[in-house]
DNA sequence: CGGGATATTGACTCTTATCAATGCCCGTGG
DNA sequence: CCACGGGCATTGATAAGAGTCAATATCCCG
């Protein structure tokens, strides 16, 4: 269904690149239906509560969607990889913020263009519906993880999920910090670190530097993840 | 948007009532576009993994959507009140199970009818999209609660949410047991009970029997919920 | 190659879970 | 109408899991 959206709304081929950061976000060039944009590591793509004028599709890199409590506690609800779309909202405000985990390329669509196009193309609406339902299912899976799984299970499930995105490759490059992982899994970074150590002791994984994880025994990992 | 769905797909007026429980679920009468059905307290409306042939709209009562881990841990992802729809899935299997918390009346739609109708009516697809996005937002709010809020905050937030559904009435009737609340909030029933006791001590609520809660100080409750 | 950010590890604390006993409410049947 | 019984809820004592605080260690990134 991502294909459909991309087909219905082909991004203009990478003109105006490289654009960096938020300032260019409101560029008049965005009047075009879809336009390529880049964001550096840790750059904000949009902020919580901001008018939701744009919808994004990841071309390369990883994006995190997060929400803050007043006292600074943070929950990351999703990491988005190439092919994923994000930023599409029920109303006209962004419910959460989006930041680049690595340097990121996206295609930006005008929300209005999407909405307008959707009155003409039933297929497009169906694509958006499908997209949203896939997001809903992923989020529900996350609810189960956060509500009922212990720290070890969460980390094991996270690694398997990351491996699945990497087309099942058993060597996973983690784009994000332990802190981000913790905020995604509802843990602290220390606990994430300890659980990784524990998974190593079990022989389920091997770390090669902090960011590269070999899944030695996916079977076992899967058994541990629930 | 629920109105739209109801308009596009008017349930046949309560024929074949009262029907009880799962056995009648597959009744040939369901060939009609929308049909009324009733379920008794604790009855299963559909099970996890079951073919997702139907979509439901709550007319009266409360429905819980839950998922089990292999060892029996349970997470309730949502409680549905009158007006809510549930059971619409990305693929053709139910991702979670649905059970009647109280006795429940629903209108049942054939998934195929919806899908077929949606190829004809762009409005209908848009309604389903909106519906799904509202569900997604609620679930994301829940992710924040489960990932980052403590027990007291969770219970306070839960009570406020229940009050909001009851059109903001400050007296809330809890349809569900402490156990269900706990499985929704990612806690144990004992902790839910203790947090309610604590909220009473703070003068934020008053319990009148276990199931009726007076919100004495919604301000305070809101401040506590984050 | 050096230094700041990131990660690991350890000691201890605190929140929530667990296990257990008791109490309460509500519906049912006498 | 009252008494009984069973689910449901409360409360207490203790344990366990994850958080917090703090001290290194390691890894990249320039």
Image (cartoon, coloured by chain):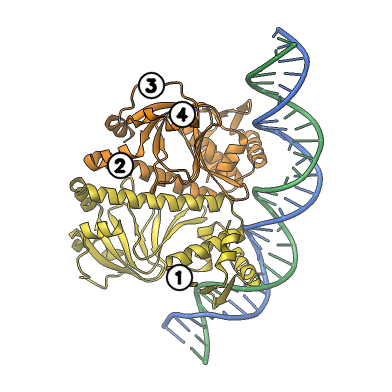
Chain colours: A yellow, B orange, C green, D blue
- Where is A43 relative to A116, above or below? below
Q: CA distance from mark 4 to mark 3?
A: 14 Å
Could you tell which of marks 4 and 2 lies nearer the N-terminus?
Answer: 4
Q: Which residue corresponds to mark 3? A: B14
Could you tell which of marks 4 and 3 lies nearer the N-terminus?
Answer: 3
Instruction: Label 3, secondary structure: give it.
Output: loop
Q: Are marks 1 and 2 on the same chain?
A: no
Q: CA distance from mark 1 to mark 2?
A: 39 Å
Q: Which residue corresponds to mark 2? A: B115
Q: Nearer the viewer, mark 1 or mark 2?
A: 2
Instruction: Label 1, secondary structure: give it.
Output: loop
- Label 4 CA crowd tier, 10 Å (few <14, some 14–19, many 20+): some
Q: Which residue corresponds to mark 4? A: B24
Judge whether residue A69 can be spotted in this image: no
Q: CA distance from mark 4 to mark 2?
A: 23 Å
Say which chain tag 3 marks: B
Q: Which of these two is toward me, B134 or C6?
A: B134
The residue under the point 46% across, 29% down is B24
- Left or right of A135? Residue D11 is right
Say which chain tag 4 marks: B
Judge whether residue A131 can be spotted in this image: yes
Q: Nearer the viewer, mark 4 or mark 3?
A: 4
The residue under the point 49% across, 52% down is A141
Q: Mark on residue A175? A: 1
Q: Could you tell me residue B7's position as x and y percent?
A: 28, 30
Q: CA distance from mark 1 to mark 4?
A: 51 Å
Residue farthest to the front, as pictured = B28
């Amino acid at each position: 269904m991502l294909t459909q959206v991309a087909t219905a709304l082909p991004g203009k081929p990478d003109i105006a690149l490289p654009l960096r950061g938020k300032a260019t976000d409101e560029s008049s060039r965005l009047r075009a239906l879809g336009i390529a944009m880049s964001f550096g590591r840790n750059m904000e793509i949009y902020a919580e509560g901001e008018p939701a004028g744009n919808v994004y599709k990841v071309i390369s890199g990883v994006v995190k969607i997060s929400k803050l409590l007043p006292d600074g506690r943070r929950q990351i609800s999703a990491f988005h990889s190439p092919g994923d779309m994000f930023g599409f909202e029920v109303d006209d405000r962004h419910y959460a913020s989006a930041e680049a985990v690595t340097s990121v390329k996206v295609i930006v669509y005008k929300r209005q263009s999407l909405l307008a196009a959707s009155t003409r193309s039933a297929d497009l609406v169906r694509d958006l519906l499908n997209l949203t339902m896939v997001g809903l299912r992923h989020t529900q899976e996350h609810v189960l993880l956060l509500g009922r799984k212990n720290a070890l299970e969460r980390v094991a499930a996270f690694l398997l999920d990351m491996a699945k995105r990497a087309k099942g490759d058993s060597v996973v490059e983690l784009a994000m910090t332990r802190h981000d992982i913790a905020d995604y899994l509802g843990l602290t970074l220390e606990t994430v670190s300890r659980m990784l150590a524990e998974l190593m002791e079990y022989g389920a994984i091997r770390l090669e530097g902090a960011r590269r994880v070999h899944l030695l025994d996916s079977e076992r990992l899967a058994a541990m993840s629930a």
